[in-house]
Image (cartoon, coloured by chain):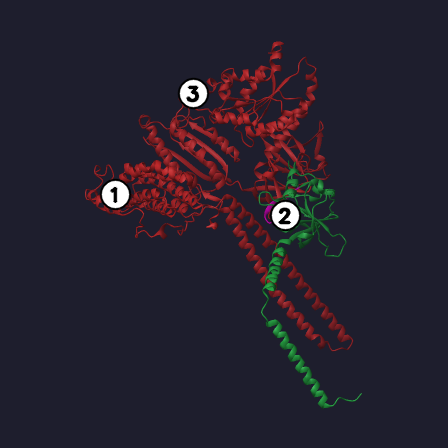
Amino acid sequence: MSEPSPATEHSTERALELRERQSLAQMRALLDRALPEEDLRVNTEIVASRGESRAAKMRSVLVFEIGEERLGIDAEESHRVVQCSPVRRVPHRTNEVFAGLANIGGELTLVATAGSALGVPAAAQQTHFVVIGQQGSRWAFAVDRVEGVRRIDASATLPPPATVRHAADGCTKYLADIPPLDGRDHRLVSVLDSARLSALFARSLA
Amino acid sequence: MSDLGGFSLHELFRAEAETHAAALSEGLVKLEGTSDPATVEPLMRAAHSIKGAARVIGLDIAVKLAHAMEDVLVAMQKGREAIQPARIDQLLKGTDLLASLARIEESAVPAWSTEHEPAVDALIAELRVAPPAASAPAAAPPPTVPAQPAVAAPTVVQSPVETPLENPVVETTAIETPPITPPQPAAAASSAPPAPAPSAQARGASVRVTAEKLDRLLQLAGETMLESRRLGSLRDETLELKRELVRLEDELDRLRADARRSGIDPAALAPARKLIEGGRERVLSHLLTVEGAIRRGEETSTQLYHEVLSSRMRPFADATATLSRTVRDLARQLGKDARLEIVGDQVPVDRDVLVRLDAPLNHMLRNALDHGVETPDERRAKGKPAQATLRVEARHHAGMLRIRVSDDGRGIDLDALRERIVRKSLATDAMAATLDRQELLEFLFLPGFSTAKQVTDISGRGVGLDVVQSTAREIGGTARIDTELGRGTVFELELPITLSVIRALLVDVAGETLAFPLARIERVLQPAASEVRSVEGRMQVLVEGKSIGVIDAARVLTLAETRRAAARENLVVLGSGGDHYAVAVDGLLGEEDLVVRALDPRLGKVPHLSAAAVRESGEPVLVVDAEDLLQSVRAALNEGRLRGARPMRALGARRTLRALVVDDSATVREVERQLLTRMGFEVETAVDGLDGLHTARDSVATGMLDIIISDIDMPRMNGIEFVRALRADPRFAGVPVVVVSYKDREEDRLAGLEAGATAYLTKGAFQDSTFADTVRDLVPALSRAERGGGEA
């Protein structure tokens, strides 16, 4: 293979440069042209509608585990999550569901055993309290593990099937497909209704 | 505005006007007594403040009234006007109008204004002219009299809505610092005419905070204190880091020795050593910084905590502010002459206790004026000064607040009292004869018992001295009366200083930490387990030759089924009225001051518990209601005895009819017990609703009750709650409940019947056959038994 002459080399270079310039000019023309009315309208619609539906369709769910169950609560319905502290049993009142009183942030809070209330066997050692409800109607319940707050697409939720084992107590608001962070296979989370959960706990005191 | 803690502007005005009106009322009465122009200033400012507050919310009627009052007070202060009772009366009238305005809701203001405008205008007109009797007294120098209209005239011209420039608003806003008077020992508080300024000013500068918010603050302050203590772990970690560096240094030293032995130049290790040394120094200085920060944090947060805690305390003066006025008005009304001395008005008292003092203090003073104090003529005839002296004294004594209300009146005639007790059928002649002085005086605390010859408007309104005793009891105190015929009467209340802090013994029961209030503990024993013996199947321990029953806390409190075996028992001895029981606990954890909080209302009335608290360590604690515990123990033991006796009874021809009497007055209990026993009932008694409920439930084991008689006003659980609780229990659904109360208003009757009472009688029912008839109607088995002729 002979070496290309410097002249040819030179002309090739120039040709390339020219072509480049041409295409650039074409591109610029394309970009600079006035936007057709129709395109503008459609694009505006798309952008606007996406923002709207994105906001409406995402929800934050606090995901935790009790025993074998992955459960959740809408983040805005949870008051706080704190490390477990000692629970004082209350004479004549403590039972299967009502565990006793704990000092949570200086507030003596009623603590329920959510596992018993929902019929889910819990682990021996629980790590965190999830606190729900307003002052005066506040409840805390211990959970085995907290996965954290997960953002989910609301369209990926299902109504609770009638046959869900703990649906007898009617606390499940919806089921959500939230893949576990540790890659396990257990994707479905029962998201609980905090008001119904509070009512269920309160029934233990009646 | 949202930062005002949820109060509306009108509510703020009401709060402010109320405070200032109280100060005015109190100060005016004092002013009348002392005629000292120097005491006018705080009153002037009070009137000015009401004017300012009224202007803010556009309440013109209050603006013009307060303005006119302020003008008169200014004239008095400047010496332009003499201080005379007639003028004081006008000012008091104005104060009352303002106070009544402060009591009504915003929505009621227009109606009030329409209704009272003429009276307000008339009063303003009176205030504008020279005082009615101004020209008469020689004390007023002639030149002052003509000067008054001249001074008053421009003020009249001035539109009342205009702010007089000479009165800068700053003067009266909350910028004033409250005089923080250190709590004085009662002895130091003088009974001489007290300076009028402090209380009025202190209140003027106060800020209203809801009790709820204060409680929340206290919780947060407590939590802050705990958090800063937890920081101690930071220090421990840094300390551990320092130790590690020291170990590293030792290791390096060893290496250097090794190096030298193996012929390596130890100098090669010098840079490493230098690094470690530098690190150690930095850790050390860090440690000092951390320690300082932790210490300061702990100090500040502890201070904060105690400060918030003490903000619950108010001077006793808060409870006495309106008393001088009450005494003055009442004495005038009764044609008597009396002055009130208040001693110890700076004694700090928990606001929860303070608010409870109002009714009892009023009743004691009303009673003293009405029944105790003689007319001036009578007093003179007896060689006493015409003016009687009433004294209200407060002081701290042995950790309790002691309040004495005394008069130098005629005292109580014990023989007359004894006669009256018999006449009211509250005791038989024979029984009355055996009553001693204290027992006789106790009758004065009975509902509806009044020693006045006729029912008067002042103190004989059906509610009376029983309020004094029931209030004292409800907050864990006592009330007693003493008297000396011809010399006077003394009421003495002994109350807890605060309801929010108690000194308690912490114990372990089945792994739970519980607190027994020290005030309820007789002693603590730790006998060897072998010293606790079983007598007739019950555990007993011998203390100073006396045998005391031992109960197991864990079982009574349903915290554990079985007791842990231990070589030594830990016994907390509780007692009341000669009864003693030892409560066996699993461990004694020491004493601590606890800030108690009410139990969560969702838990309802929890038996044997009175409150909850958070320990200094952050751990929750439950406070034991020793009284309640004792009562259920007593009931349980009694029941055991009854059960042993019952089979014998069951052999008898007819079933024994059983009644339960619930009343907090021993006398009423006894009267009812005797009546029912005479009718053929076997009667059990209980001292309040809670005790009644326990007794009723326990008695089910031995057969059903045929009738229950209950009072309404009782400590711990009142009759209404008691009846409701009974009705909620299907076992008592069919049992007739007769409420016997001194309350005879229709709404009280309805409240009783609504709660589920079968019949509602007033205590007058004992005087005739109403009570017996009602019982016969409600217990058909009784008439059958009577017809059968078994009745004694």
Q: Quadrant of residue B273?
A: bottom right
View extreme (right): residue: A1
Where residue B399 appears, as percent x and y from the top left, is 51, 40
Amino acid beneath label 2: Val
According to the picture, the residue beneath numbered tag 3 turns out to be: B416
Instruction: Residue at 52%, 36% (x, y): give it.
Output: B475
Instruction: Provide the letter of the chain coloured green.
Output: A
Q: Which residue is mark 2?
A: A131
Decide: is B763 above or below B106.
above
Provide the chain ID for the residue under circle 3. Answer: B
Q: Which residue occupies 61% across, 74% down?
A: A29
Mark 3 surroundings within 10 Å by alpha-carbon count, few (fewer than 14), some (14 through 19), many (20 or more): few
Residue A4 sits inside the magenta stretch: no
Q: Which mark is residue B103?
A: none
Report the amino acid beneath label 1.
Glu
**Residue annotated with mark 1:** B81
Give coordinates of residue B51: x percent, y percent: 35, 46
Secondary structure, magenta segment, majority class: strand
Task: Measure the alpha-carbon separation of dots 2 and 3.
Answer: 65 Å
Q: Is residue B115 above or below residue B176?
A: above
**Quadrant (top left, top right, bottom left, bottom right) of the C terminus of chain B:** top right
Is B34 left, or right, of B493 in this rendering? left
Query: From which residue to which does the magenta span run?
Result: A99-108
- Horizontal relation, residue B731 to residue B193: left or right: right
- On the same chain: label 1 and label 3? yes
Q: Colour of chain B?
A: red
Left or right? Give the position of B591 relative to B444: right
